[in-house]
Image (tube, helix red, strand yellow):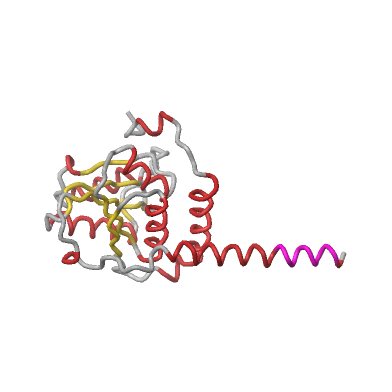
Amino acid sequence: MKKLLYYILWFFWFILAFIVGVNFYVISFSFDDYYTSLSDIKENNLTWIVFWASIIDNKIPSNILKDRLNSAYEWYNNSIIDKIIVSGDSQNRNYNESDVMRQYLVDKWVSENDIVVDYYWLDTYDAIYRAKNVFWETDLVLFTQDFHLKRAIYISNRLWIETYWFETSIQNYKKDYNIREVLARVKAFLEIEIFKPKYWDWILKKDKLFD
């Protein structure tokens, strides 16, 4: 019994050390400064990825998603970006983040021709991979709240996708998301370094989920 407890204890400490080490490794990719204001980026013709977040009643973006959409609109309205990719969970007709995101931007007078809707959300890895390899967008801007941006920067770097990084924290969400993000970084690490997910042809080639 004591021997079993000994092994359990060592396994616990191994898992804890692994989680801490992976998080430090992922965060290390964002040690360089990233952009925090519109004036920092001088280039034009950029494409913006709006990462998903929850929606309410399949109609209204949550506060965290509104922050991301409003930031994208601000850049679009200032002619700094030309195209916006909205990448969301749309695998259920009764819960369609992508269309809610698209409609929110259209209501703000963003041209539908400038919105690319990615219905095949799975996770941050998929959104970044598909932006480059499915939609063929090369001048990408990743923008999201700070806690999420660190993981997005790591993924784009390890996929050898050149991006600009912009942090938007209109509100403070760290208390709610930091613990979740610790585990999400481990998941991203396993995807990038070990499992290296491949994509079925029907996912890569299609750009709409519902006909």
Residue at 16% from the left image edge and 66% from the top image edge: 39
Residue at 22% from the left image edge and 43% from the top image edge: 115
Q: Residue furthest right?
A: 1
Magenta part, dominant SS: helix
| Count of marks, rendered view | 0
Is residue 16 placed above or below 75 in the rendered structure?
below
Task: Answer left or right for 146 relative to 104.
Answer: right
Observer-nearest of 186 and 96: 186
Task: Answer left or right for 173 relative to 6.
Answer: left
Locate residue 37, reporting x and y percent.
21, 67
Quarter occupied by residue 170: bottom left
Observer-nearest of 147 and 102: 147
Residue at 38% from the left image edge and 39% from the top image edge: 120
Observer-nearest of 101 and 190: 190
Placement of the C terminus among the 4 image quadrants:
top left
Residue at 50% from the left image edge and 48% from the top image edge: 191
Locate residue 183, reporting x and y percent.
53, 60
Placement of the N terminus among the 4 image quadrants:
bottom right
**In the image, which residues are magenta?**
3-11
Task: Answer left or right for 43 relative to 58.
Answer: left
Locate residue 93, reporting x and y percent.
38, 37
Magenta run includes residue 37: no
Is residue 206 placed above or below 82 in the rendered structure?
above
